[in-house]
Image (cartoon, rainbow, N blue to C red):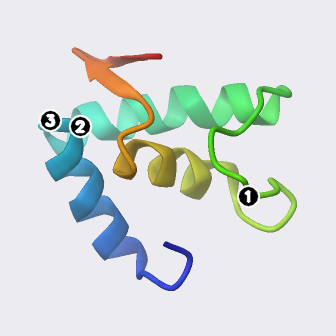
Amino acid sequence: MKNMRLEEITAKALNAAGIDRYQLAVAVAQRAKELENGAQSKLNIDLKSVKSADLALMEIAEGLLTIKGFKYVD
């Protein structure tokens, strides 16, 4: 996943979640804020090695978070 370009990860996340880019942006922002406030990553990636927004996007792309409306649910 780390070797994928951001555009590829975004496309995978949009496809996996079945949402539009605006819903994805809101969900990524919410999850990134949680990660920055100490939430545990659902991937084995250290937050110090990747930006919180990128990590949130990766979690969604891997299907680890479900998006409903403009929020994600575990």
Mark 1 residue element: loop
Identify the residue shown where x is 64% and y is 48%. 43
Left or right: 10, with 57 as reference point: left
Left or right: 54, with 41 as reference point: left
- x and y percentages locating residue 58 in the rendered image: 48, 54
Q: Disc 2 or disc 1, which is closer to the eye?
A: 1
- x and y percentages locating residue 2 in the rendered image: 56, 76
Quadrant of the rendered image containing residue 64: top left
Task: Compare marks 2 and 1 and give the one earlier in the sequence.
Answer: 2
Look at mark 2 in the image and give the residue it sits on: 22
Look at mark 3 in the image and give the residue it sits on: 19
Q: How far apart are the alpha carbons under marks 3 and 1?
A: 25 Å
Q: Amino acid at mark 1?
A: Ile
Q: Amino acid at mark 3?
A: Ile
Q: Nearer the viewer, residue 67 or 32?
A: 67
Q: How far apart are the alpha carbons under marks 2 and 1?
A: 25 Å
Identify the residue shown where x is 25% and y is 60%. 12
Q: Residues within 10 Å of mark 3 (few under 14, many from 20)?
A: some
Check the image and report above or below for 72 versus 9.
above
Left or right: 26, with 17 as reference point: right
Quadrant of the rendered image containing residue 31: top right
Q: Amino acid at mark 2?
A: Tyr
Look at mark 1 in the image and give the residue it sits on: 45
Identify the residue shown where x is 69% and y is 59%. 51
